[in-house]
Image (spheres, rainbow, N blue to C red):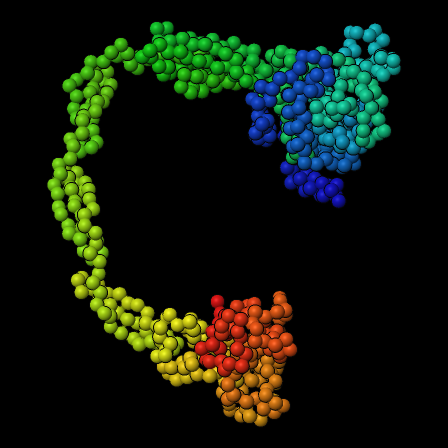
Amino acid sequence: MKRVLIAVLLAAALLAGGVSNPGTRHEPALSLSDQAKAYYSGDYTPEALAALPGSGGDEPAVWGSPLRAALHSLMNASRTGLLSYAETLTAFPDTDRSGGSEEPLRFYCDDFGASYNREQVWADLHGAFYHDGAGGDLHHLRPADPEANFVRGTQCFGNVQDRFSGAQRWPAEGEPVFRYVSDWNGGQGLVEPRDGIKGDVARILLYVYLTWGQEDGGNRNLWTDLPPCGAGLTESDGKRVMEDLDTLLEWMTLDPVDTWELGRNDAVQSLQGSRNVFIDYPELAFCLFDRAIPDMPTPSGWAHAAHCVLTAEAIPETGGSLSVTDGPLGTRIVSAAPLPGWSPTAWTLTPEGAATVEQNGKVFTVSALREDCALTVRFELTNPCVHGHSWDAGVVTIQPGCTEPGTRTYTCTVCGATRRESVPALGHDWHRTEVPPSCVRPGYTVDACWRCSLEIETPGDPPLGHAWDEGTVIRPPTKTEPGELRFRCTRCGASRTEELPFRFADVNDEGLWYFNAVYWALHHEPSVTSGTDEIHFSPDMECTRSQIMTFLWRANGSPAAGSSAMAFTDVPEDAWYRDPVLWAVERGITAGTSEHCFSPDAACTRAEIVTFLWAAAGRPEPAGTVPPFEDIPENAWYRRAALWAAERGITAGTAPGVFSPGLICTRAQAVTMLYKLYGP
């Protein structure tokens, strides 16, 4: 699926012409494309890479150097995908086109032809990546004349001309593409391509070396025997790819990057995400091995700039001195050291346009050097009074206040410089006002400054407090809504209101033991009881069976019974307690006084009340077995209910150790037990 998607994207890119190579072969690349510049960012800017150490030791040490690690990470992390080995052929007409030809430029021959095949510049047998890994990397693959591909074979790259008397050439007539000796190094063979593509070969080999090499072996060494490695074929054949490091770096210098090679780098990046950094910055190859960067044309100009001579001159010499140090990528840093009173204010470069100069204070950065040049920095005397000013009498520029000092400014009559001195503050000009206390505000003394309007308030006598009247009822209370009582202050006229709660005439003392229970029952939703008339609760009245069933029913939310059939003949259809009785029978709270009688008007005993409450709670088992009351027989029908009620704190009896089961329960006692069971 991934390769199908890559093929679709490749076809779309080719149709849009988005990866076409616009470069010209053998035209030196003297500037980087915008695409190339954008590739190097974050930790991988050219300056950051150039600052990393390489290694002057053997190849394993180079492999472990910080610069090698950074380049390996950059080129692998930026790769978004590779084409399949078969798909790479479809990319060549765009990535390797030149001069408007519809055929790709054949690599070793450096010409065009309808016949070409795929060349792995790092031979697959030496790297074990015939189809996988580097075997599908377009930076490593080039279209090649089939016969040239055959002649090159898997021979090691190196210099042949003028070294071997029996060297062969291909083709035999005309300009040679290869010179080679087949019996070199035990039969591996040594091949030297034409000069115009030697740099391409070296940069490709370095790319594969840095990108696809493996730390524990694999393609780690370019010019020594390769240990076995992984994907594609079973293992590498162990033969070297390049004769030696000096030859590789020599080829890079001999054949600099051209605009066609840079354009191909852009085109391949558009297809697979990664770039060959040695095309953009050939200088990094020399940094990698701690070799001096030669003077050669490169896209960045770094190599040539590093060999240009920059001289610096300070004018006048009495103004200061200049020092020149090397900066990154062939830049020069010119640091100005002005003498006291002098500043570097202007510069000129000779010849004009020989480099780019940026000034940041006393530091001048000279970059993109194209030829030897001289930087002249002009110093100006910016402080003629460096050895002392001639001050005038000064003027007050900021008037002093009561607490803030002012400022007197002096001006030098020679150079116009200024200095400032503090003028002492004037202090406050106080006056005092006495303010007596009011009902809500304490008295105080105000000390105010006439000059700055600052006021300081000092507390005096405390507030007098309101003198409230006895209050006036402006809304009488009802059983459902509190009333309102308004008080007025006889001193200041302020007013306040208080809620006036409803009070039964016979339950008006908050100290009554049943006070909270009665008003909980009144305000419960729905109301458990609303009293016996508009203003009386009748706390001492006997609680009847119909009343306690209604109290329980309302305390449980007045639920509807499952059936409307009434078994008791003494409960009329229009009785106010009919629904509570239906619900209580259904819940098993009561079974009546006989099969057909409920006895609604019969007074309830204490034993009956606790039994009703216990049944409404689901008849839970008490924790203990012995009630704290001496007047409850062991076989009493209400024994478990009384024991549970005592444990729950619903009743403590009528006296220590006495429950009084047969005592008639009053309305006050009944709602108090309900409050202890259902209340807050």
Total marks placed: 0
The reply, left or right, for residue 472 in relation to residue 530 is: left
Q: Quadrant of the N terminus?
A: top right
The quarter of the displayed image where residue 285 is located: top right
Considering only vertical position in the picture, is 400 above or below 331? below
Point out residue 519 in the picture as x, y percentages from the top left corner: 42, 73
The answer to whether residue 497 shows anywhere in this view is yes
The reply, left or right, for residue 155 in relation to residue 68 is: right
Considering only vertical position in the picture, is 335 above or below 675? above
Point out residue 462 in the picture as x, y percentages from the top left corner: 21, 51
The reply, left or right, for residue 559 in relation to residue 175 is: left
Which residue is pictured at 77% across the width and 16% down the height? 223
The answer to whether residue 566 shows anywhere in this view is no
The reply, left or right, for residue 630 in relation to residue 12 is: left
Along the viewing direction, whichever of 104 and 55 lies nearer the viewer: 55
Along the viewing direction, whichever of 161 and 427 lies nearer the viewer: 427
Considering only vertical position in the picture, is 268 above or below 196? below
Which residue is pictured at 50% across the width and 89% down the height? 601
Point out residue 302 in the picture as x, y percentages from the top left corner: 57, 17
Along the viewing direction, whichever of 457 and 358 lies nearer the viewer: 457
Which residue is pictured at 51% across the width and 91% down the height? 574
The quarter of the displayed image where residue 233 is located: top right
Point out residue 272 in the picture as x, y percentages from the top left corner: 68, 34
Along the viewing direction, whichever of 50 and 5 lies nearer the viewer: 50
